[in-house]
Image: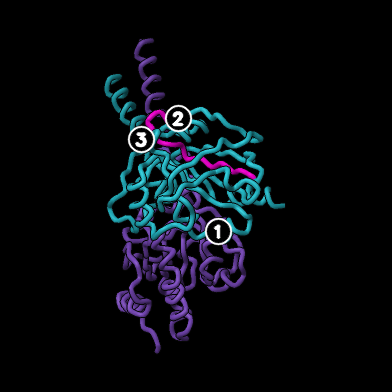
């Protein structure tokens, strides 16, 4: 009898240890994990930008962490970049051009928003990249790769394009690792695939 | 039951132990990056410390010119960036960042020298895929790892640690960082240390 009790206790301890190591993310994850997301849905928490212009751009009325679903837009383009990525460096001017194209069109600038996530980049490194390339749209640091791991450890530069899915969230309609050949063509393709109607 | 549990536990521990290093691979290198998995964080014993005179060396750079540390005495601060190996994930995700920070190094009157125990042709091809670098990249291949060994950053497999050594204009070591080989040092840390030399 004592042997059976001992075995049960041992089994419970072993299961606890097993779960601890098999699912360390449950315990250690610094990732801003949201509730379980439907297929195709992409969401994670980001800190509200310190810059008031960027908060206004994203339509945030709070300085608390926000989820992608809170961004006021119909389409959100998320660039996964790194200041250590030679292609991201070369592409900085092109993604700036995409941003300027969006902002220059009254029928578009309130519907399409652009953000960047610096995979493995500290706040210092993201700020350095922003200043180096005069980037006007909001960039966020992912120092510990928590977002990068959550989205599948994509290579850089990688673009996720998201559209409103009717449930106060965004779903991915495009995901690709690539350099932007032509900003205008890149934007037009995304707009066409997004299905949103845009005034000229 | 006990056997099954122990087996599962073993698998779980193995999986935990071989989690990959932290890096984000650029498409700049195509499919040429060799992932070694997670390595022993540090595998050497430092032979230098802050306040020491930096051991002099003369190594050949990928341009074919000799780079002699003592030639900078009285003229420039020097930052040595030891990296383990070309064509590996974290290393390929380090120097390209320094490549866009030339103005910071200039601001602090500091030259950057990249050092690896890889042979020159390998370093030449690898840095070409980065688009070229503004700073000197030198090979510590032969006598193999001699400079790395003098500084105490040569690992048991013949590669160097991921280490930063900052030397002032008098040739004195002012900062040493031998980090986890699986992680890239933060650029912010390097800048803060250079700032200290130029208050």
- Mark in the foreground, 2 or 3: 2
Residue B155 on the magenta span? yes
Answer above or below: position of A14 versus A68.
above
Place residue A78 in its image quadrant.
bottom left
Q: Is circle 3 on the same chain as circle 1? A: no
Label 3: state its secondary structure.
Answer: loop
Task: Report the chain shown in purple.
Answer: A
The residue indicated by pointer 3 is B18
Chain ID, mark 3: B
Determine if residue B39 is in view.
Answer: no
Picture coordinates of residue B181 (x, y %)?
45, 38
Q: Chain of mark 1?
A: A
Q: Is residue B42 left or right of residue B170?
A: left
Residue A42 falls in which quadrant of the image? bottom left
Q: Residues within 10 Å of mark 3 (few under 14, many from 20)?
A: few
Q: Is residue A76 magenta?
A: no
Distance CA(mark 3)–CA(mark 1): 31 Å
**Where residue A69 sits in the image (x, y, percent)?**
45, 65
Tell me if A167 is positioned left or right of B30 in this view.
right
Tell me if mark 2 has few (under 14), some (14-19) or many (20+) residues whose alpha carbon lies within 10 angstroms of its own.
some
**Nearest to the observer: residue A140 or residue A59:** A140
Residue at 38% in and 15% down: A5
Identify the residue under disc 1. Answer: A47
Identify the residue under disc 2. B43
Residue B83, placed above or below residue A138? above
Front-most of residues B25 and A167: B25
Give the magenta-colored segment's residue range.
B154-168
Q: Are marks 1 and 2 on the same chain?
A: no
CA separation in Å, label 2 and label 3 = 17 Å
Query: Residue pushed farthest top?
Result: A2
Q: Which mark is residue B182?
A: none
- Closer to viewer: mark 3 or mark 1: 3
């Amino acid at each position: 009898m004592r042997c059976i009790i001992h075995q049960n206790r041992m089994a419970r301890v072993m299961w606890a240890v097993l779960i601890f190591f098999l699912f360390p993310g449950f315990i250690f994850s610094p990732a801003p994990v949201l509730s379980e997301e439907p297929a195709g849905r992409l969401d994670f928490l980001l800190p509200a930008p310190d810059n008031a212009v960027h908060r206004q751009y994203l339509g945030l009325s709070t300085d608390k962490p926000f989820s992608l679903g809170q961004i006021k837009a119909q389409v959100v383009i998320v660039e996964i970049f790194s200041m250590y990525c030679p292609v991201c460096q070369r592409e900085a001017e092109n993604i700036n051009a995409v941003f300027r194209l969006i902002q220059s069109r009254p029928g578009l600038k309130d519907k399409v928003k652009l953000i960047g996530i610096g995979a493995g980049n500290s706040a210092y490194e993201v700020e350095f990249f922003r200043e180096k390339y005069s980037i006007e749209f909001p960039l966020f640091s992912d120092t510990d790769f928590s977002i990068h791991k959550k989205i599948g450890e994509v290579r850089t530069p990688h673009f996720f394009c998201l559209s409103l899915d009717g449930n106060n969230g965004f779903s991915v309609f495009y995901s690709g690792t690539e350099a932007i050949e032509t900003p205008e063509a890149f934007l037009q393709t995304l707009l066409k695939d997004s299905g949103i109607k845009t005034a000229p | 039951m006990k056997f099954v549990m122990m087996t599962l536990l073993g698998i779980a521990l193995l999986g935990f132990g071989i989690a990959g290093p932290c890096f984000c691979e650029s498409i700049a290198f195509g499919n040429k990056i060799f992932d070694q998995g997670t390595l022993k964080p540090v595998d050497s014993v430092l032979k230098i410390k802050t306040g020491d005179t930096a051991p002099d060396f003369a190594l050949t750079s990928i341009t074919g010119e000799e780079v002699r540390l003592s030639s900078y005495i009285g003229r420039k601060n020097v930052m040595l960036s030891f990296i383990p190996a070309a064509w590996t994930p974290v290393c390929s995700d380090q120097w390209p960042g320094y490549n866009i920070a030339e103005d910071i190094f200039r601001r602090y009157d500091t030259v950057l020298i990249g050092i690896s125990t890889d042979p020159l042709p390998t370093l030449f091809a690898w840095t070409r895929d980065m688009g070229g670098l503004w700073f000197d990249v030198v090979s510590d291949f032969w006598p193999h790892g001699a400079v790395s060994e003098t500084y105490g950053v040569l690992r048991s497999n013949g590669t160097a640690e991921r280490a930063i050594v900052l030397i002032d204009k008098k040739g004195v070591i002012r900062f040493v960082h031998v980090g986890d080989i699986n992680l890239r040092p933060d650029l912010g840390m390097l800048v803060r240390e250079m700032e200290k030399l130029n208050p």
